[in-house]
Amino acid sequence: MSVKETVYGLEHCHFIITTDSDAVYNADNHPQRNRNLQEIKTFARMAWQKVREYGKRNISELSIQRYKKIIGRQLHAREFSCQKNEPMLGCGILNRMTKLGMPVSYRCA
């Protein structure tokens, strides 16, 4: 079973993938896609993105992109037990790099 099929079967998961601007309601499509289309028509696209927290999707995509660029696209360990630990180490490295490189800022009146 694919990831998409698994997620389709879950009741508590919501798809926040935007649709094309010329997309139309179709009874053959997934109900959540049709719901998104209706909400975009009702609230306008930017308001819909704010309500559905669409920005969190962008943050996660950027994190995956950063991981692949710095750490690499494939695992380097040969043994499965080591392969399970490799992504954790990679995330730890990225978190440390982010912490060291991010400025501590505060608002001045």
Image: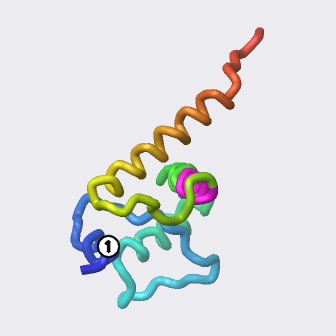
Work out whether 62 lies above or below 94.
below
Local secondary structure at mark 1? helix
The quadrant of the picture occupied by the C terminus is top right
Confirm whether residue 98 shows in the render.
yes
Number of marks in the rendered image: 1
Residue 28 falls in which quadrant of the image? bottom left
Q: In the image, what residue type sits under mark 1?
A: Val
Magenta segment, prevailing SS (helix, strand or loop): helix
Q: Please, which residue is most extreme toward the right here?
A: 109
Work out whether 6 lies above or below 93.
below
Residue 40 magenta-highlighted: no
The picture places residue 65, in percent across and down from the top left corner, at 59, 58
Confirm whether residue 49 shows in the render.
no
The quadrant of the picture occupied by the N terminus is bottom left
Work out whether 45 lies above or below 106.
below
Q: Give the camera-side residue of 41 and 54.
A: 54
Magenta residue span? 62-69
Could you tell me which residue is drawn at 68 percent across and 31 percent down? 101
Residue 65 magenta-highlighted: yes
10 Å crowding of disc 1: few (<14), some (14-19), many (20+): few
Q: Give the camera-side residue of 18 and 60.
A: 60
Whether residue 34 sits left or right of residue 44 in the image: it is: left
Q: Mark 1 points at which residue?
A: 3
The picture places residue 36, in percent across and down from the top left corner, at 46, 68
Q: Give the camera-side residue of 28 and 61.
A: 61
Could you tell me which residue is drawn at 72 percent across and 15 percent down? 107
Could you tell me which residue is drawn at 55 percent across and 41 percent down? 94
The picture places residue 11, in percent across and down from the top left corner, at 23, 64
